[in-house]
Image (cartoon, rainbow, N blue to C red):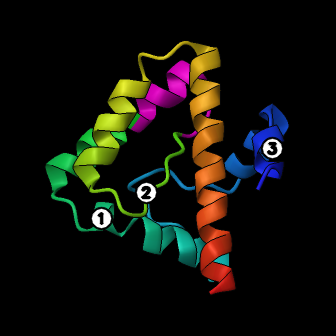
Amino acid sequence: MRWPRQWQQPELEAALSAHPRIGERANGADKEAALSRGEQSAMQQADSALQQAMQQGNQAYETRFGRVFLIRAKGRSGEQMLAELQRRLQNSDPAEQQEALDQLREITLLRLKETIQ
């Protein structure tokens, strides 16, 4: 359980290279895409106003931090994910890198748990 705590910027960048934007359907038939689609199902069911707000938030986040917004989507509503995105836009660069790494750890541990079950 300690190994994810040691992750830094290179691990975050590697994970984000395959991460779809929140609210955009993950393409592909591989297991990673299927997991992302399932985890983000709340956004797939969101109304058009929420989807548009998330799209605008994603653009603002990418402009601000230069990477895709990463959040553990499973168990969160679309409104909760948007609120987190808006909150995190106020972070400093180091604080946001830490939050993104924390989210990456949560996603990884969640997927490991689901794989083992």
Disc sitting over residue 96 in the figure? none
Residue that carries the numbered disc 1 in the rendered image: 42
Mark 1 in CB contact with mark 2 (< 8 angstroms): yes
Name the image quarter holding the C terminus.
Answer: bottom right
Magenta-tinted stretch: 58-68
Q: Is residue 82 left or right of residue 37?
A: left
Q: Secondary structure at mark 2?
A: loop
x and y percentages locating residue 28 in the rendered image = 61, 76
Q: Secondary structure at mark 1?
A: helix
Which image quarter: residue 115? bottom right
Say whether residue 57 is magenta.
no
Res. 2 in view = yes
Residue that carries the numbered disc 2 in the rendered image: 73
Residue at 43% in and 52% down: 22
Residue at 28% in and 46% down: 80
| Along the viewing direction, whichever of 5 and 97 lies nearer the viewer | 5
In the image, residue 73 above or below residue 59 = below
